[in-house]
Image: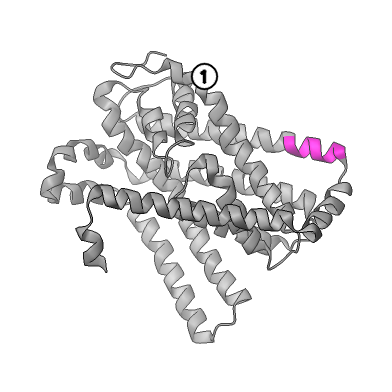
Amino acid sequence: MLSNYQKLTGRQKKYISLLLKILVFALATWYIITKVSDKSNIDKFKTLITGLEQHSVVWTLILIVVLMLVNWLLEVVKWRYLASKLEHISFWKAFQSVFCGLTWAIFTPNRIGEYGGRVLFLKPQNRAKGAVAMGVGLFAQLVLTSVAGSLSIAWFICKFLSTPLSVQFGVWLLAIIYAAGFVILYFNVRWVDMLVGRIKFLAKIKPFFEVLEHYSARELSIVLVNSLARFIIFTSQYIILMKLTLPELPLVSMVLMIFILFFVQAALPTLDIFDFSVRSFVASNLYSYITTQEIAVMAIVSCIWFVNLILPAIFGSIFVFKINFFGDTNS
């Protein structure tokens, strides 16, 4: 089967990938429509929101928006720090590039447009290297998502699925190896540069990856701490909303399932603009083990999706006009 896949042309692979994304989106959308159409689910949700104090809801939403701003300001600081290996950029320029990248990201698969939207604020000669530097920051975020997610999945399997003790041991072992692998690779990102250098057909892009050689373990640690702060912030957003609407949820299970949700989101290929359906589908299935308020869970996920991705993307559209595609983008 693998050999047959390798025989496919680039265009055929692109079509297959597109069909898979459409299938995932269609299934998730169908699932949500089914849940929302269920009168018993609607009645439960109405009863739930009727019991909420309007004052508490307003202040909670304000807090979620404030946390979103802090989250992306931390990303601005991280991006400026990473880009400093290539050129000095002001905080304002880094701010514009991050939010412009978010605008590009929502319309592109797997947020690939975020690279283009962000690095176009660098000098032309630094843009390719800038994409690699940006990749370091995204990888730091992925390390945390992968470590927390893989260990949480192991917990979930052992707690909610009927598995023999030997299987549980194997699951935990795999999760620990998987998590450790990400941490080791992150603190040795220069291996990527070495690998590219050994592959002949990648020789032309080898100079772009040389920036990886310039990040020390201390600098990578700083980037990881920044990413951890962001990870804590968007985890807190979920906890705050869930504690407001579903206070009966057990805290530990709630948090670990949030980590699994992040992990699945990172693994599934989709578009940010349609991502709410996939997120809602995954969250609804996960939390069905500890609550019957599936629509409430979907509402929480959709709210955070809108605040964290769509609002900043709308704001970032202002900075699209600052881009000079063929030269330096002045601040």
Q: Is residue 159 rendered magenta in the image?
A: no
Name the one closer to the observer, 293 or 124: 293
Residue 92 point in image, percent of width and height: 48, 19
In this picture, residue 38 sits left or right of residue 223: right
Q: How many marks?
A: 1
The residue type indicated by label 1 comes to Ile
Residue 219 in sight from this viewpoint: no
Q: Residue at x 44, y 74 (%)?
A: 173
* Residue 292 occupies quadrant: bottom right
Judging by the rendered image, the residue that carries numbered circle 1 is 318
Q: Residue at x 54, y 30 (%)?
A: 313
Residue 36 point in image, percent of width and height: 72, 54
Name the one closer to the observer, 303 or 210: 303
Q: Residue at x 42, y 32 (%)?
A: 79
Q: Residue at x 18, y 38 (%)?
A: 205
Q: Is residue 155 above or below residue 182?
A: below
In this picture, residue 84 sits left or right of residue 297: left
Name the dominant secondary structure of the magenta segment. helix
Residue 140 in sight from this viewpoint: yes
Residue 145 point in image, percent of width and height: 49, 54
Please tell me whether mark 1 sits on a helix, a strand or a loop: helix
Q: Which residues are magenta?
A: 54-61
Q: Quadrant of the C terminus?
A: top left
Residue 279 point in image, percent of width and height: 58, 51
Q: Is residue 200 above or below residue 39?
A: above
Q: Residue furthest top?
A: 330
* Mark 1 crowdedness (10 Å alpha carbons): few <14, some 14-19, many ≥20: few
Q: Is residue 56 rendered magenta in the image?
A: yes
